[in-house]
Image: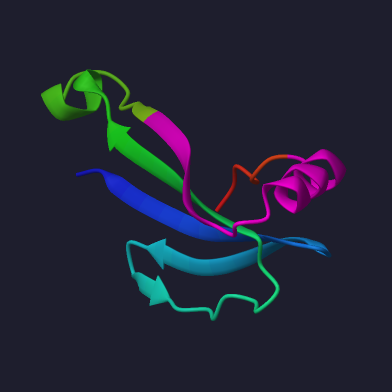
Amino acid sequence: MSSKEWREWHLTPNGWVAGTLQHDSGRNQISSPDNKVLTCIYKETIAPDAMALSGYGEPGFNQSSNVSIIWRCSNHQLISELLDKFGSCPERI
């Protein structure tokens, strides 16, 4: 069985702020900051590999991840400046 987890990240004038987190055990809902200019979601999936599913050998796991923009304000210049200052969306839960 695979594990699918994600976290929202909000870019603000103060940097990246962690938002809502989805774990296998449930969701930790966090309000987004009022001063956000961009919201991304970082997703991570961890699944057993073929060896783990076959029952032979040491089980291993395959991990994949991706980042998607789910909201942005209309001030593209500000977004660009803040991305230059703070970097791209964090790739971590």
Q: 31 or 12: nearer the eye?
A: 12
Q: Position of residue 72 (x, y in %)?
A: 55, 55
Total numbered badges shown on the rendered structure:
0
Q: Is residue 69 left or right of residue 79?
A: left
Quarter of the image where one finds residue 33:
bottom right
Is 49 rendered above or below residue 15? above
User: Is residue 43 found inside the magenta-colored segment of the image?
Assistant: no
Q: How is the image coloured?
A: rainbow
Q: 43 or 24: nearer the eye?
A: 43
Q: Is residue 61 left or right of residue 86?
A: left
Quarter of the image where one finds residue 39:
bottom right
Give, as a single range, the part of the protein colored magenta.
63-87
Is 92 rendered above or below residue 16? above
Residue that lies at the very extreme toward the left in this rendered image: 54
Q: 18 or 72: nearer the eye?
A: 72
Taking the spot 47% from the left edge, 66% from the top edge, the residue there is 21
Taking the spot 23% from the left edge, 20% from the top edge, the residue there is 51
Taking the spot 36% from the left edge, 41% from the top edge, the residue there is 45
Q: Position of residue 54 (x, y in %)?
A: 13, 22
Is 25 rendered above or below residue 58? below
Is 48 rendered above or below residue 82? above
Q: Position of residue 80 (x, y in %)?
A: 75, 42
Quarter of the image containing the N terminus? top left
Q: Is residue 14 left or right of residue 1?
A: right
User: Is residue 69 found inside the magenta-colored segment of the image?
Assistant: yes
Q: Position of residue 84 (x, y in %)?
A: 82, 39
